[in-house]
Amino acid sequence: MDPCQAPYRDLFDALSQSGPAEGVFETLLRPWLDAHAEELDWLNAFAQRASPAPIAIEDSWRLYALSRVNQVLLLAFQRNEGEGWEGPNLGLPDYIAFMTGLGCRVADETDYSPFFHEIVELAEEKRTLFSRRKAVELTRVDWPALMLGTMMFSRAGVAVSCAPGALNAEVATSSTLYWERWRKHRRTSDLSDGWGSNSQWRTPFRRDYLVGEKLLFNADGKHDLAAPGLPASEHDDLTVAERIELLTHRCFVRCEKPDDDCHPYDDRIQLPRDFRQ
């Protein structure tokens, strides 16, 4: 086990074994914060210097380990469509208390953006020709977006409404979600998939950044999707527009091509903050 990941992996294991009646904030999360001041210091220092510049791979693994803890915590706020584990016994205020205790801040964005928001539910609504409503609007927030400095650490889970044709409701809520390991309500795909119990943790963390009035998606990607002469994807039969859709939303929201074996991990793009979704 990598020493920098050990505190998060220990917490991940404890959360995964918690019982339905166990209030994990008092029994696990608060004691963890009290016992790991060095992690709080490291995360606060990272937030202060957070920039799209490359980071040490060990730091990326460390962030990834924390993201795995976060994904377990988020199960508490997701609908369960099967017989699986409901997730830890955790309320939203205690979740926010833990994550802000780590140095994250809640990003309360009222306009829908794939940078800030993951769609968990979508309804189409008819709009008049002269309607001033946006094509996609938030209707509910199930868990908040969290920033670590200028870096997006965890997107909000939201319900949205949209004008007919703006998004494909079935695709947007059920297509494979990339860069995630665990969701109760949809398929996920992550670079850790298929690796053993130790090697899976040596997975880099996806870094998205607010850069002034621009949004940078996947700062460590090798292929700039806005660059001229972009080579075809080595893995996917996708157009550039479809690759941008998959990269920015982390899933398909309109494209109906096969979604379970894509490889968007090498792509990156910087877009205006108000780009059309």
Image: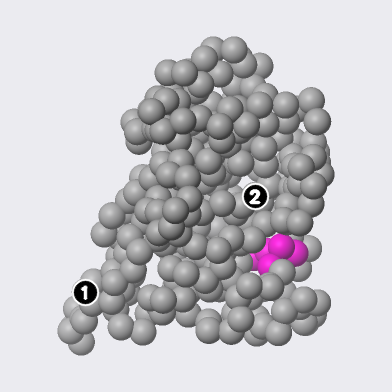
Residue 134 sits in quarter: bottom left
Q: Is residue 182 magenta?
A: no
Residue drawn at point x = 79 percent, y = 40 percent: 198
Does residue 116 appear in this view?
A: no
* Structural distance between the alpha carbons of marks 2 and 1: 34 Å
Residue at 66% x, 16% y: name it. Answer: 38
Q: Position of residue 80 (x, y in %)?
A: 40, 54
The residues colored magenta run 264-269
Observer-nearest residue: 133 or 62? 62
In the rendered image, is residue 93 in sight? yes
Q: Which residue is label 1 attached to?
A: 132
Q: Residues within 10 Å of mark 2 (few under 14, many from 20)?
A: many
Label 1: how many residues lie within 10 Å, few (<14), some (14-19) or many (20+)?
Answer: few
Disc on the earlier residue, 2 or 1? 1
Question: Mark 2 = which residue?
Answer: 207
**How many discs mark residues in the rendered view?**
2
Q: Quadrant of the N terminus?
A: top right
Type of residue at label 2?
Arg
Q: Residue at x 69, y 68 (%)?
A: 264
Q: Is residue 268 magenta?
A: yes
Q: Position of residue 189 (x, y in %)?
A: 64, 61
Which of the numbered marks, if any, corresponds to residue 259?
none
User: Which secondary structure lies at badge 1?
Assistant: loop
| Residue 113, quarter of the rendered image | bottom left
Q: Secondary structure at mark 2?
A: loop
Q: Nearer the viewer, residue 169 or 103?
A: 169
